[in-house]
Image: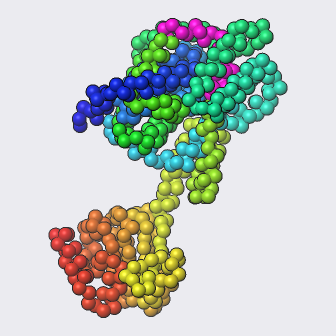
Amino acid sequence: MSLHKIIPILSWLPNYKKSQLKGDLIAGLTVAIILIPQGIAYALIAGLPPIYGLYSALVPQIVYAIFGTSRQVAIGPVAMDSLIVATGVSTLALAGSESYIAITILLALVVGVIQLLMGIFRLGFIVNFLSRPVITGFTSAVALTIGLNQFRNLLGVDFIQSDQVHVLLFDIITKLKDFHLETTLIGVFACLIIIIFRKINKKIPNALIVVVLGILVVKFFNATFHGVSIVKDIPSGLPSFYFPELDIAQIKELMPIAFTLVMVGYLETISIGKTLEAKQDEYRVDANQELVALGLGNITGSLFQAYPSTSSFSRSAINAESGGTTGVSALVSALLVVITLLFLTPVFYYLPKAVLAAIIVVAVFNLISLKEAKFLWKANVLDFWLLVATFVSTLVFGIEYGILIGVGLSIVVLIFRTSRPYVVELGKVPDSDFYRNKARFSEVIVDDIVLVFRFDAQLFYANANYFRDKLDELANQKGKKLELIVLDGESINRVDSTGVEMLKDRIKFFRKKGVTFYFAGIKGPVRDALFRGGLLEIIDINHFFMRANDAVIFHKTGDNESQKKYAQYIHQSYK
């Protein structure tokens, strides 16, 4: 493997052009302006002091700029992962305590190690078990949960924090009458300002604007807005080196939440990276290298007091829209975070937590995808109910169980679909050599003595019995007139030993009834598997045809020159 693949920055940095610098500078500054207040806000979601949001915005994005294959993905703290962290770690320690912080940093190390190992051993395919409906349902549910959890800061009421929506809603309804008027006014107006500016132009740094306005209002009108909860002191200075204490028992307890973070974080990064990749021709995203980059980012970040981080949908999009084309924009963003940590943290003293809540609420509610649900209802009802099931289970049982149920349902649907594929009888199109689905093409000619059928999937242990049952059903419909069965295998891309044995059994079964069995359009690798499985011990090469029409003609006339050539070709290729 080349060094450029291991360290992708080496593939673009030596060829960096001056013309790219302006776009990267603007993009880096724009992302940092959004990232800094978001980092502070998301740390609060995670149950951590605000400074840890800035720590997580620093080292991981520098590491990703070096090792990541996407040049536009923005790495740092995100709302979804922050809530997952809070949900998992809050069962082990009191939020905000020293032990809570230590466990959270250890979690970042565990997540990073898992990601790195998955990348090294090229296990990125595992994420394929999370289908798009599951991702959408999970993301929407988590977004709703995050938003509801922020009502405590938005309204100034000490609501319970939970990842179970019925618990949250009951508590909110019970205590809503106790809302703090001044806090609610600041929170609601901040939401309105963000929404208005987003509609005008998404490039407007709405988060920065409401942060500045919030600070000014509370600082200069303190008497009017007395009792509004503010961030207060945020320590200055860069994060010091810190190696998490490796407690094996604690690591075991963290494994379920760590795997949840790995799956969700990887999904976010790949989906964002692939979306941005499609809009340009300069680079390609490598899924396994992305795992390596995320893993190294979280490992290194944990050594400098960062909690788990991943890519941000909104910041990545803004980075690309603002002209960012390389990892230089991430380095610029990180530099601004350094300046903030060194000199600007006192500025945030009077920042109302209601403003941070407003930033989070508006950001996460945009992740609730009603449009996708409507589309799936029309396009695929099974996928729609998969989305609904994941959405509801995440809301009711919590984030950790939601993702597990989503994965489980994805696997169940996969097994269902592969075990019961589409099987159809074909008929001949008049005045042609083609055979088509008789259920779709009413004009096709169906011969009573011939059964031509197609099986649209790989043939293996999970669907071999289904194949046999459907074949017998179609054959029974023909009755005693049936003389020939032709399997159109163009859609079969693999066959295992169970499938081969089932075919051998059916060929013998129909032979006893005086019915011949032919194969048409079988792919080379599938044919090889059939031959290795001993199929030629009960039939010969003359039973294989290029097309279904050739098989039918050969059966009726016994003379087909093209079949002789095809049988000779198969014989030569198999030898």
Residue at the front extreme of this rendering: 19
Report the magenta residues as a range.
Answer: 341-362
Q: Is residue 285 magenta?
A: no
- Can residue 353 be seen here? The reply is yes
Q: Considering depth in this image, is 344 or 165 the residue closer to the camera? A: 344
- Residue shown at 32% from the left, 36% from the top: 120
Report whether 25 appears left or right of 562.
Answer: right
Instruction: Mark yes or no: residue 519 visible.
Output: no
Picture coordinates of residue 273, whole percent (x, y): 44, 38
Q: Position of residue 466 (x, y in %)?
A: 47, 69
Position of residue 445 in the picture relative to residue 211 (left or right): left
Residue 348 covered by magenta stretch: yes
Seen in the picture, residue 100 relative to 129 is either above or below; the reply is above
Q: Position of residue 494 (x, y in %)?
A: 35, 63
| Type of secondary structure dominating the magenta stretch | helix
The residue located at (43%, 11%) in the rendering is 240
Q: Is residue 571 left or right of residue 450?
A: left
Residue 234's image quarter?
A: top right
Relative to 450, say whether 85 is above or below: above
**How is the protein colored in the picture?**
rainbow
Total numbered labels: 0
Question: Is 409 rendered above or below residue 500?
Answer: above
Q: Nearer the viewer, residue 102 or 186?
A: 186
Residue name at image x 78 percent, y 7 percent: 223
Quadrant hosting residue 283: top left
Residue 481, position in %: x, y?
Answer: 44, 92
Residue at image location 57% in from the left, 16% down from the top:
50
